[in-house]
Amino acid sequence: MSSELRELYQEVILDHGREPRNFGKPEAANHHAHGHNPLCGDKVTIYLEVADGLVRDVGFEGSGCAISMASTSLMTETIKGRPIEEAHTLFRHFHDLMTGSEDGAGEEVDEDAFERLSVLSGVREFPMRVKCATLCWHTMEAAVKGDQTEVSSDE
Amino acid sequence: MNVVAPVATDHGRSYTPPYDVDTFRKDFPILATPVHGRAFLDSAASAQKPVQVIDAVRRCYEAEYANIHRGVYELSALATRNFEAARETVRGFVNAPDASEIIFVRGGTEGVNLVASSYGAKFVGEGDEIIITYLEHHSNIVPWQLLAERVGAKIRVIPIDDRGELIMEEYEKLLNPRTKMVAVTHASNALGTIPPIKQIIDMAHAQGAHVLVDGAQGAAHLAVDVQAMDCDFYVFSGHKVYGPSGMGALYGKRALLEAMPPWQGGGDMIESVTFERTTFAPLPNKFEAGTPHISGASGLAAAIDYVTKIGLDNIEAHEAALLAEATARVKEIPGIRIFGEARHKAAILSFLIDGTHPHDVGTIFDHEGVAVRAGHHCAQPVMDRYAIPGTVRASFALYNTMDDVDALIHAIGKVKEIFN
């Protein structure tokens, strides 16, 4: 098997894809948004309980490929309990990791949290799959903004 | 139970194709390109082009190009002759009675939209019914929905059974005097099902309804005879029969096309224009506003000549052998579910591998040099019917070989290696 494929489908990703964490709707959720990737049919709904600027709880429902399920699962694990501003920063860094952009350059980021997300770095070699990994983040941002319109990931 | 009888139990080694596949395969330059080209199993999305088609397009631009139906100069006359010769080639391909019943369109989608708009404006009113099927591609669903919303008509849908065959008893129940149009695929792009088209048409006609056959998948794999079929409309896309994209054809019965109003207005479709009144050109120009895809017509004609030279019966037999072999071997692998096991089937193998999503499979296949379609195939209702997000679809064309089947089986092994 090629190293690129092995890098993409690491055991951590397969595990989170099979058994996603934080699956379901938290009872006290006060924000939510739907995300949809029309090209491949991935669907996700992100629920957040945000209070005093903190992500107190987060969960999701939906279906999709191993990459999108794992990315969503890892995102929820990573942002749970963090200030919402940190979640935005993590997204900018994660986005840079996926696309090679530099939106988060110069911003401080929690290294442990970012390292956890870095298992998805193999996606970078598969440009067609980047949107699978970023859909949940776009949807999380829409949920925070209270934007109820559906997110379509097309990058 | 195998519904497709396997022709080869020794993995195709004893198989002798009905034509020299390896020689014809050399006509397709892209298949010799190493990048992602080892096993191209996505011809149902769009087929690759033989050098004969590429040359025809090149010749058009290099030596025979001018706008058609306009200039008095010889080059324009030549371009016009070629364009009309292409129309005659298409007429022969579908065995239409007359070349004026062949309307050039961008593809199957535009053909359906033309009929839904123009036929719909003339023949479909409030409370009328349009029958489609669960097998349809979005292009044979959405234009009818738009029409139905516009005029207050109703869409009725023929259901399918688990094998992916239309339930004809249900079709019979849906037909009634309010049925104006039955729009049905010649071959399903998602499941491969080939419906009993002649029976469907005869039943519709008995109720006074008209029938449009969506030949997007059918025309590349089945010999088409619109007169024997007695369909009222037939549409197909050039790019799926090894021709250029952006070029296709609509066949319609003359009496209907003449009764229908023009669809788009513009140059070439008029007889005379004043600001008070315009009279329209006779068929086929009435439906061909604006400068058409001139080189596309040359390419499409070359593509039709090409498949005709091999013989659609031969192509169908070869593809059936590939499908039977692939189906038999996929069934030997545990944990695979095949979707679409109709008794009469085009060379499409739709499946899911347990515990995997089609998109992950598509990525891994691509890495193994196997190009397949992964997703809902623009046929979401049929995916909903099976309660699945999509499938992996391998489709076979005239240039595929038993080696491509081997590559498919090998790639499935890789997926299982990664995911198990």
Image: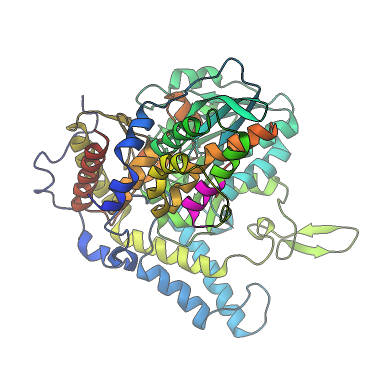
Closest to the observer: A33 or B284? A33
Residue B216 at what x, y percent from top left?
46, 47
Where does the N terminus of chain B fall, quadrant-wise?
top left
Question: Which residue corresponds to the image point at 50% horizontal and 20% vertical from the top-left?
Answer: A24
Question: Which residue corresponds to the image point at 37% horizontal and 70% vertical from the top-left?
Answer: B52
Observer able to see residue B44: no
> Looking at the image, which residue sits at the far top?
A27
Q: In the rendered view, would you say A31 is above or below B283? A: above
Question: Does residue A142 appear left or right of residue B33 in this picture?
Answer: right
Question: Does residue A13 appear left or right of residue A38 in this picture?
Answer: left
Question: Which residue corresponds to the image point at 50% horizontal and 42% vertical from the top-left?
Answer: A110
Q: How many marks?
A: 0
How is colour applied across the structure in the image?
rainbow
Question: Does residue B339 appear left or right of residue B14 in this picture?
Answer: right
Magenta stretch in the rendered image? A92-101
Q: Is residue B240 magenta?
A: no
Residue B47 at what x, y percent from top left?
39, 56
Closest to the observer: B338 or B224? B338
Question: Which residue corresponds to the image point at 40% horizontal and 44% vertical from the top-left?
Answer: A120
Observer able to see residue A77: yes
Q: Is residue A96 magenta?
A: yes
Most prominent secondary structure in the magenta stretch? helix
Where does the C terminus of chain B fall, quadrant-wise?
top left
Where, by quadrant of the figure, is residue B146 drawn?
Answer: top right
Residue B284 at what x, y percent from top left?
63, 58
Where, by quadrant of the figure, is residue B301 drawn?
Answer: bottom left
Q: In the rendered view, would you say B249 is above or below B52? A: above
Residue A14 at what x, y percent from top left?
33, 35
